[in-house]
Image (tube, rainbow, N blue to C red):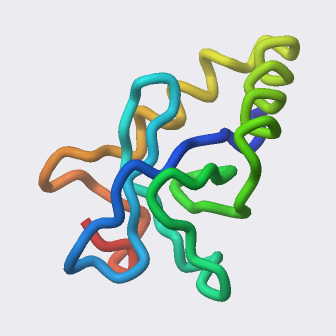
Amino acid sequence: MCLAIPGRIVELVSGQHQVGVVEVAGVRRKVQLGLLADDLPKTGDWVLIHVGFAMSKISEFDAAEQMRLLSMLGETEQAMEEVRGYGLEEGATRYGPDFPN
């Protein structure tokens, strides 16, 4: 089981519609921001991510609480494996043609 993972937006990817780079515990990965189109996050905002999609914006306090909860549930390593799987490198395989590299 993996819950939503908190990440901080560190970059909005130019030339790629509604894609940002998030950082989770030092790991940076691209995520799709389209589900938050009505209130797109900006650099520095915190979001909850799941399978490469930002699901909601959250506060920094709530992000720390979510990481604490993941740790208490023993899910931290699985969450980090999920984040590593998003890929940031060029040519990384994504979830389909609608998810830009």
Q: Residue at x 37, y 45 (%)?
A: 29
Number of marks drawn: 0
Q: Residue at x 30, y 73 (%)?
A: 100
Whole-percent x, y for residue 55 in the image:
69, 63
Whole-percent x, y for residue 63 in the image:
73, 37
State left or right for residue 4 relative to residue 51.
right
Between 64 and 91, which is closer to the camera in this rendering? Answer: 64
Q: Quadrant of the C terminus?
A: bottom left
The residue positioned farthest toward the bottom in the image shown: 38
When the figure is inspected, residue 26 is found, relative to residue 34, above or below; the finding is: above
Q: Residue at x 67, y 18 (%)?
A: 76
When the figure is inspected, residue 86 is found, relative to residue 68, above or below; the finding is: below
When the figure is inspected, residue 12 is found, relative to residue 76, above or below; the finding is: below
When the figure is inspected, residue 74 is found, relative to residue 32, above or below; the finding is: above
Q: Quadrant of the N terminus?
A: top right
State left or right for residue 24 relative to residue 93.
right
Q: Quadrant of residue 56?
A: bottom right
The residue positioned farthest toward the left in the image shown: 90
State left or right for residue 26 relative to residue 78.
left
Whole-percent x, y for residue 37 in the image:
59, 84
Q: Residue at x 60, y 61 (%)?
A: 54
Q: Quadrant of residue 39?
A: bottom right
